[in-house]
Amino acid sequence: MTHPFSPGLAYRALCPRAIFPAILFFALSPGAAPALRAQTDAAFDSVARQGIDRVYNLEFERAEEDFRQLSRMRPAHPAGQFLLAMVDWWRILIDLEDDRYDARFLSALDRVVDLCDSLLDVRETDVTAIFFKGGAIGFQGRLLFHRSDYLEAANAGRKALPLVQEAMAMAPENYDILLGAGIYNYYAEVIPEQYPFVKPLILFIPPGDKKKGLAQLALASERATYAAVEATYFLLQAYYFHERDYVKALGIARNLHSRFPDNMLFHRYVGRAYVSMGNWAEATAVFEEIRARAGKDQRGYGPAIEREAVYYIATNHMQAHRYEEALKAFYRCDELSRGLDRKEASGYMALTNLKIGMIYDAQGKRPLAVGQYRKVKDMKEFRDSHEQADRYLGNPYRGE
């Protein structure tokens, strides 16, 4: 079936200027940062792991308590400040349209860089300081990339990548650091492979190795101390978006959702995988649960994820010819889209209005159907939305 989202949408419709920073910042992941545990002890590591797990379950306030404790335990160590920034990163990630946390996030990373510079003033080969400094600069670039400031994002990547590579060379046996290598190897091959027009733009970066990258991610997922969850999440995205191995993606998504039941990103991938496999009964059950959580204003389950849920619920009803139930859910999807689509109509808006028109046709309401198809034609085309609208303008949809 046609999904109203795509890998291109997921990565902000990677344009030529965005490709290079995208590769870099996929490799500069928050989960990998605490990997270098110099000057720490078992108690420090335990608090760090507990806080990281709380971040992934969107327990932000409790995670912040843990990371402030880290800063008190080791004031000169950059981990506490970096992980505090990670909390705000996830606040941003669950609603990328909300920029309230941007300044605080960037400020926390500036403090990380300052701490790292102090350590490097004492010892130029301090691997912990090198890694955290590279990660902090790269992390700033990830936000700039999402905010479409591609020039500054690329500049951050230019500064960060040599530092991260240096840290990797100094500690090649570290499974947490393997996450960054895996992400880089995978996406450095996949992005030019799936977006051929960018190949001339990335001739100056080392080539990737998709197979090796997947193996590195799998190893980090199994053995990393801190980066296991992040590695698992990147494996999920790789198998779902690029490899299109929905059976593997489903297994990974179910594992993550079981471990972090309040993380809506992991939750919705369970539903997406079921949809892609054609298992509509299981998919609808998942998205009904997501819709219920959205109705309770659970953290992370905001309008964007509710829209996705009701779209698939409506589609399932439509396929079963339960047209009134489908219309009710599609109307809700359209309502949510009008609030979310601030610049232009999204894929959800286009496909929802197209399918409303198809249902009207199936119900014998031809004038209403024609009005819907014309609305779709006035929207930005999403895949073949205009082609389908033209088809049904010429020949009414019969509910096949």
Image (cartoon, rainbow, N blue to C red):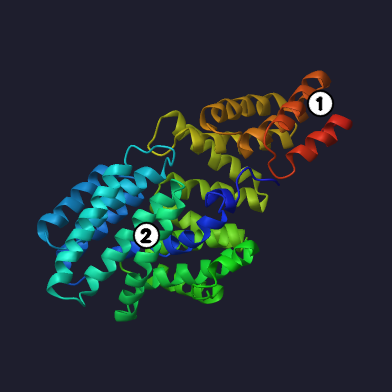
Relative vertical location of residue 328 with respect to residue 172 in this rendering, above or below: above
Q: Is residue 298 visible?
A: yes
Question: Residue 17: which disc?
Answer: none
Q: Nearer the viewer, residue 241 or 345?
A: 345
Number of other residues with Cα within 10 Å of mark 1, as a class: few under 14, some 14 to 19, many 20 or more:
many
Residue farthest toward the right in the current orientation of the protein: 395
Query: Can you tell which quarter of the image residue 158 is in?
Result: bottom left
Question: Residue 361: which disc?
Answer: 1
Query: Can you tell which quarter of the image residue 114 is in?
Result: bottom left
Measured as percent of width and height from the top left, residue 295 is found at 46, 29
Mark 2 is on which residue type? Answer: Ala
Sequence-first tag of 1 and 2: 2
Query: Can you tell which quarter of the image residue 316 is in?
Result: top right
Residue at the location (46% across, 53% down)?
A: 150
Q: CA distance from mark 1 to mark 2?
A: 52 Å
Relative vertical location of residue 221 with respect to residue 140 in this rendering, above or below: below
Q: Is residue 20 left or right of residue 223?
A: right
Q: Secondary structure at mark 1?
A: helix
Number of other residues with Cα within 10 Å of mark 2, as a class: few under 14, some 14 to 19, many 20 or more:
many
Residue at the location (33% across, 37% down)?
A: 100
Q: Secondary structure at mark 2?
A: helix
Relative vertical location of residue 38 with respect to residue 347 in this rendering, above or below: below
Q: Nearer the viewer, residue 232 or 319?
A: 232
Write down the residue under mark 2.
156
Residue at the location (63% across, 48% down)?
A: 275
Relative vertical location of residue 76 with respect to residue 211 in this rendering, above or below: above
Measured as percent of width and height from the top left, residue 130 is found at 26, 70
Whether label 1 touches label 2, CB < 8 Å? no
Label 1 or label 2, whichever lies nearer to me, is 2
Residue at the location (21% across, 78% down)?
A: 125
Mark 1 is on which residue type? Answer: Asp
